[in-house]
Amino acid sequence: MKQPVPLVVDTTTAFHRIYLQGKWEKDWATKHAVHIQQWANRGDEVRFAPLLDGDDAYLIEYMTWYNCNTRRYITPESAY
């Protein structure tokens, strides 16, 4: 399927820096309720797009965006 560049993407690193040791008193379910609800409703967010038709010109723009906004390899060194 053709996938356009997303208009808005939450790429905040704040979630990746959460360190839970010594924070047992926090109500994490309440703090992250919005994200938990998004995950619970993920089935409602299925997207449909045109099938690939052999014209991959759009792919250049998408892959440029993708390579700048995605970690293709996850290692301890790239976590922060």
Image (cartoon, helix red, strand yellow):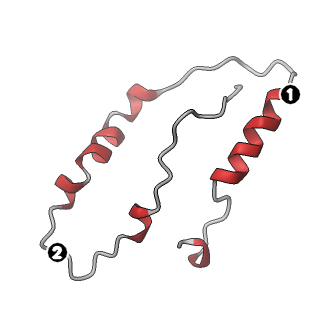
Q: Counting other residues with Cα less than 10 Å from the Cα at mark 1, is it few (<14), some (14-19), or many (20 or more)? A: few
- Please name the residue shown 20% across and 76% down the image: 23
Place of residue 60 in the rendered image (x, y in percent of width and height, measured from the top left): 82, 37
Look at the numbered disc 1 and give the secondary structure of its residue: helix
The residue most toward the bottom is 22
- Please name the residue shown 67% across and 29% down the image: 3
Above/below status of 55 relative to 61 = above
- State which mark lies toward you, 2 or 1: 1
Residue 24, label in figure: 2
Of residues 35 and 69, the one nearer the viewer is 69
- Judging by the rendered image, the residue that carries numbered circle 1 is 57
Q: Amino acid at mark 1?
A: Ala
Compare marks 2 and 1 and give the one earlier in the sequence: 2
Place of residue 67 in the rendered image (x, y in percent of width and height, measured from the top left): 72, 51
Q: For residue 72, which quarter of the picture?
A: bottom right
Above/below status of 12 relative to 45 = below
Place of residue 22 in the rendered image (x, y in percent of width and height, measured from the top left): 21, 82
Q: Amino acid at mark 2?
A: Trp
- Please name the residue shown 26% across and 53% down the image: 32
- Quadrant containing the N terminus is top right
